[in-house]
Image: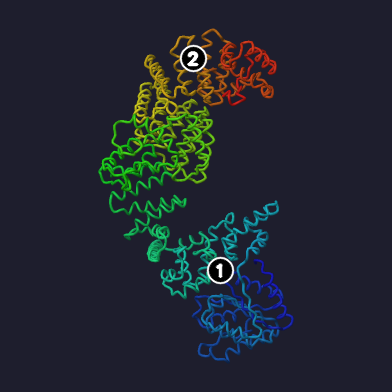
Amino acid sequence: MFRRAEEHSLLSALLDGCCAESNSALVLVEGAVGCGKSEFLETAAEEAERRGALVLRAAGTPAERGHPLAVLGQLTADAPAGALPPPPAPETAERVGSMRAFAAAVRELSTSVPVVICVDDLHHVDELSSRYLLHLARGTRRSRVLLVLAGSAHDRGADPLLRTELLRLPHFVPLRLTRLGREAVRAMLPDATDSGAAAEVESGAESGAGAGAVAEADRLYEATGGNPLLLRALLQDPQARPGEAYAQAVLACLHRCGAATEELAAAIAVLDDLATPAHLARLSGATEAAADRALEALSAAGLLAPTGRRGLRHPAARAAVLDRLDPAGRAALHREAALLARASGASDTAVAGQLLAARHTGEEWALPVLRSAADQHLAQGLPDRAEALLRLAHGACPDDALRAEVGIRLAAVAGRTDPAAAEHHLAAPLAAAGAGLLGPAALGPLARTLAAQGRIDESVEVLERLAAADVHPGGGRGEDPLDGLSAFPRWAVSAGAPAAAAAAPPARLPRTAVHPAALWALPVEQEESTAARSAELFLRGATLAEGTVEPVAQALRTLLHLDGAGRALPWCEEFAHRAALREAAGWQAVFGGLLAEARLRLGDLAGAADTAGEVLSAAPGGGGVLLGAVAATRVRALLAMGRLEEAGAVLARPVPSGAARSVHGLAHMRARGHHALATSRFHAALGDFLDIGRHMKRWGLDRPRVLPWRTDAAEALLRLGEAHQAERFLADQLTTRDAADPWVRGTTLRLRASLREPKERQAMLSRAVDELQRSGDRYELARAMADFGQVLREAGEPARAAMVERRAWHLAGECGAEALCERILPGHTGEGAAAVDTADAPDAGLVASLSESERRVALLAVHGDTNREIAKKLYITVSTVEQHLTRVYRKLNIPGRQGLPADLHPGVPELA
C-alpha cells in the first residue's frame, strides 16, 4: 500500500482499542475513486486478523443496490455457522425489532472474540442493509466491535441521510483519503521495486542522478495527479509511459464513478479545452448541477486537468475515453461539439478541431473556418495540424476553382513532410488554370509554389495567364506575384533577374513580376565574395520555418557555388540537422540534397552517396522531381566509385514526365548522361547534356559553377572521336563568367589537355592540377593528377610520373574511387594498396615539423612540379626551392622526392 503513515497509525490505535480495551469505534473511510479506500479496508481486515479478531466482510455493488438486505446477507454468510441470524423475511425486515436482534447477535459474538466488520462501497449498499448497519453502530457502542465503512465522497447512495446519522454517533471517526502529493510520490518511488520504471529511478538516484529522479517523480505526478490507482498502473507500463495499464485504470475509475460520470467523461474528452459545465450538460444531456457534481468527483480523483486548463489530465486518458466510443457515436459528439463551439464564439482552431475529428464539412461556414484555422496553426508552428485541416477542406470544396485554391495551399504546406505529395497536389490546380477556371487570387500563389518547386516553365505559363488578366493577386497592381516566396535579401533575386529575364523566351509576365528562374540564379551584379558574405550573414540569423526554407536553400546554393563547398558544408549540415529535429522529411530532402551535393563537390564520394541515400530512405513515397535530384547526386557518386549496377538501380526510380521542365529535372538528366557515359552509350549521354544546356540557356541559368554541361558534352564528344566539337565546347566554357572559378577552370583544362600536343598537354595539366587543388575537389584533382602522371611517363620522366601517380592514387583512395585507383595503379586496390601506400611513409610527427614554406614547396613537389615550376609559382628562386627541399628530405629522413608522403596535405588555408 502507498505510504499513509497517519492513517495507519489511527487504524492501529482503533484496532488496539477494540481488541485489548473493549472500545468500539465506527470508522467512515471516504475519498475519490482510485484513492485507496478498498485497499485501506483490506489492510484493516488483515491487521485485525493478525490481532485475533473475527473479520466480517461485505461490499455494495450497483447490481445488488435494488436487492433488500443483500449486504446484510454477505455479513451473515461470512460469520461462523450459526453465529448470526440469517436476514429476516421481507415482511419483517423493516421492523425495528429485527434490526435490534441483529445488533444483539453481533454484541453476543463480540463477547468471545473482537469483531471487525468491513463494508466497502457504502454508496452502493441497498437502503435496508444501510439501516441495519446504522442500528448496529448504535447498538454496539460498548462492545468489542469495530465497524469500518468505506464509500465515495461524492455519491451518497440510496440513503443520503445515512452519513448524517453516522456523524451524530459519539464514537464516529471520519477518515478522508486524498490523492498523493508531489512529495509523497517522490517518497514512494524507491519502494516500488517491483516496477522497472521505479527501479530505474532508484538506480538513477543512487548514481547521483537525484535531479533526474525528482523530475521523473514530477512527471508521474503530472500524469496521475497523485491518484494511487493511476500511479500504480502507470508504473506497470513500459518506461512508466502511459500505455495499456494506464488507459485501463482511467476507464476503471470512470466506471466506478457510475454511468452518468462515464457519459460526462466522454463529453469532456470530446470537448477538451471547450469543456465548460454548460457545454458538458448540453453534450451529455445532463443538467448543469449534475455536470458540476460529476466534475467535482473527477477533479477529486485527479482525472481532470489542473487549474487553468480544461479537459482530462493527460492525452492518454483522453485517448482511452475516446477509443471506447463507437465511431458513429464519437463522430456525432464531435459534430455537436463543433456546433456548440461555433455558437459560443470559440476560436476557428477550436471549431476546426471538432470538424476534423467528426470528418464533417456540411455547414456552410465549415470551409472558411478550416482554411482560417490552417493558417493559424501554421503561424503557431503546427504544420501537421494545418495539413490535416487543409486535406479535409480540399475534399469539401464545392467547385474546381475553390478546390484548386485549397490544393495550392495544401501543396505549400505538404512540402514540409512529403515533397512528392506537394508536387502532386498541384496537378489539379494546373489543370484548372489551363482550363481558365482560376482567377488572379489563385494564379499568383500557384506561380509562387511552382517556382519554389523549381518548375520554371509551368510557373511562367501561370504568370502569363495572370498577365493576361492584367490584375495582380489580391486585386492590386503593384505586387510581385513571386514576392513572399522568401524573406531572403532581395539582392539574390534582383541580381539574378536580369540574366534570367534576358535569356528567357518572350513571355508576357505581370509588369512587376520577377522571372521564376531568377529565384534559382546566382548573383551576378556584384562581387561574388560580397554575395557569399551576404549569404552567410543571412544564414547566421535564419530560422527554419515554412516561409524561410526557400531563402535558406537559396543562400546555401549561393555559398556552395560562389565560395566553395568547404564553406557551405557546415551550413548544409546545420540546416539538415534542424530539419531532422522537426521531423520534416521534405525539408530534409532540400537540405540533405544540398549536403550531398557539397560532399560530392569536395570529392567525398561515399559521404555524398550515403547522405543522398538517407534522404531517399527518409522521404515518404519515392517520386517527385526534388527527390529525383537527390537520387541524381547519389547516382553520380556511385558512378565515380565504380558501382555501376547500384547507380543504375537508383536511376531506375520513377521520375515525373515533366521533370525536364524543372531545375531538379536537369540534375536527373545529368546523372542519366553520366551513367550513359559509363556504359558506353555516348550518343545518349551527349543528347542529355545538350538538352541540359538548352534549358539552362533558355532560363538564363547557364552557370558552369552549378551545372557544367559543356565539359560533360565535351567528354561525350571525345569518346565519340569528335575532337573539334569537344574543343569548341571547352573553349566556350572558358569564356563564360565562371571561367575564373578554380573548379570550372581545372575541370575544363583537364579535358582540353587531351586535345593538345604532349608538351602543351603537360603544361595544361599542371595548371589543371593547381586549379583543382585550390577548388577542394579531391576526386577531380585525382583525375587530373592521374592524367598528368600518364603524360609525364609518356614524356620520359618515370620518376616524376611515379610520384604524381602515387599522389593521385592516394587521393582517389581517400575519395573511395576504386575504379580510378585501379586505372592509376592496376592491381593495387584494397588492402594491398594500403600496404603499398604506407610503406616507407615518414612518421606523422616528422611531417608536422615542416615549416609553412617547406610544406608549400613539398606539396608542389608531390604534385609533380619541377624545381623551376615551383620557383615560378611561389615567386622564389630555384636555389631557395632546392634549399627547402633539402631541409624537407633531412627532416623526413628520406633520400629524395620519391620518398615524399603522398598524403601530404596543406598545413595552412592559403595552400588549399
In the rendered image, is residue 425 in sight? Answer: yes
Specify how the rendered protein is coloured. Answer: rainbow
Q: Which residue is mark 1?
A: 301
For mark 1, give the secondary structure: loop
Tell me if residue 173 comes above or below residue 787 in the rendering: below
Q: Which mark is residue 764?
A: 2
Mark 1 or 2, closer to the camera: 2
Q: Is any atom of residue 817 visible in this view? A: no
Q: In the rendered image, which quarter is residue 549 located in?
A: top left
Where does the C terminus fall, quadrant-wise? top right
Horizontal and vertical percent position of residue 390: 38, 51
Identity, as a three-letter code, of the amino acid under mark 2: Met
Picture coordinates of residue 567, whole percent (x, y): 53, 32
Total labels drawn:
2
Q: Which tag, 1 or 2, sits closer to the chain's start?
A: 1
Query: Real-space Cα distance between discs 1 and 2?
Result: 85 Å
Q: Quadrant of the N terminus?
A: bottom right
Amino acid type at mark 1: Ala
- Label 1 crowd bin: few (<14), some (14–19), many (20+), radius 10 Å: many
In the displayed structure image, the side of residue 822 where residue 677 appears, left or right: left
